[in-house]
Image (cartoon, helix red, strand yellow):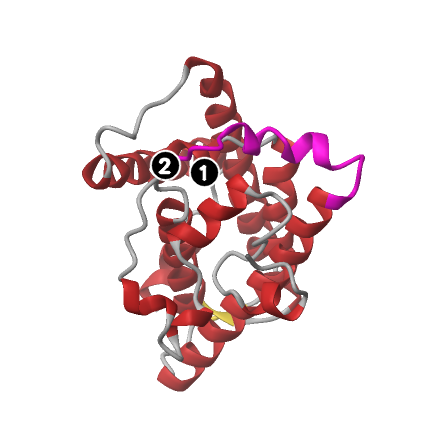
């Protein structure tokens, strides 16, 4: 596989070179998300001076997580499936999204309800009115927490590489859309039997306005089950 071969070409590089490479990669994703934010909400996409260090620290933490993930793969601890089975890709993608949403829901709920964790998460909630930069205003401990959940899941379970890529694209997209000021989802989304279970911009915006509700990320199902949904 081309992607597998490309990853193996990175094997000879030392940790410093890999960190720089992944830093460039993650920086490009930050720039891309900001550009999308500016396209969708140009007047709302601005970076406050006090948030610059947090955006930078989140970038560095994400780079560190990427590096650890690569090292786990390089040393054979993390197994990745490189087959082209459509059924497997669909199954793995759905499973990965569902499990990550559940684990992140639990983590998100805990950082709100454990007294020793909430001061860490409180930083993110300094953004009551959100924009795309809110996605990166996180305490390093929280960023690493989400990152280690991700690494744990894709290490204990073997996922298809395309499923991993699809999930990462979806995760970034929902991070952007979830922190916009204006809801970009159509009105039917909230009443349709299928789409009403999928999170929206308004769903996460409501969480920033009422921190005791709406802890889910991609789906509303966990909040409905645990009765934490507005």
Name the side, left or right, on which 73 lies relative to 85.
Answer: right
Q: Which residues are magenta?
A: 113-131
The dot on residue 132 is 2
Q: Secondary structure at mark 2?
A: helix
Provide residue 180's location: percent of width, then percent of height.
35, 42
Q: CA distance from mark 1 to mark 2?
A: 6 Å
Whether residue 11 appears in this view of the structure is no
Which residue is drawn at the image coordinates 42% and 47% (left, top)? Answer: 175
Nearer to us in this view, 13 or 82: 82
* Residue 217 visible in the snapshot: yes
**Residue 80: percent from the left, percent from the top?**
51, 67
Residue 12 at x, y = what percent?
Answer: 48, 44
Q: Is residue 144 above or below residue 199?
A: above
Name the residue carrying label 1.
Answer: 135
Say whether residue 144 is magenta: no
Residue 94's spot in the image, x, y percent? Answer: 47, 74
Q: Name the residue furthest bottom.
A: 87
State left or right for residue 184 relative to residue 49.
left
**Hey, which quadrant is residue 194 in on the image?**
bottom left
């Amino acid at each position: 596989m081309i992607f597998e071969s490309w990853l193996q070409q990175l094997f000879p590089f030392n940790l410093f070179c890999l960190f720089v490479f992944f830093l460039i990669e993650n920086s490009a994703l930050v720039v891309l998300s900001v550009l999308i934010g500016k396209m969708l909400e140009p007047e709302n996409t601005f970076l406050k001076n006090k948030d610059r260090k947090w955006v930078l620290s989140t970038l560095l933490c994400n780079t560190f997580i990427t590096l650890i993930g690569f090292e786990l793969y390089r040393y054979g601890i993390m197994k990745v499936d490189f087959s082209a089975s459509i059924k497997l890709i669909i199954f793995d993608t759905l499973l990965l999204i569902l499990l990550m949403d559940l684990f992140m829901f639990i983590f998100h709920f805990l950082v709100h309800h454990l007294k020793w964790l909430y001061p860490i998460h409180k930083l993110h909630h300094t953004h009551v009115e959100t924009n795309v930069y809110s996605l990166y205003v996180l305490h390093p401990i929280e960023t690493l927490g989400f990152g280690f959940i991700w690494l744990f899941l894709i290490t204990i379970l073997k996922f298809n590489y395309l499923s991993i890529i699809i999930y990462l694209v979806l995760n970034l997209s929902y991070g952007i859309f979830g922190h916009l000021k204006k809801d970009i989802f159509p009105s039917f989304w909230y009443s349709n039997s299928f789409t009403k279970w999928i999170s929206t911009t308004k769903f996460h915006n409501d969480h920033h306005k009422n921190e005791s509700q709406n802890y889910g990320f991609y789906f509303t199902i966990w909040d409905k089950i645990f009765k934490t949904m507005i």
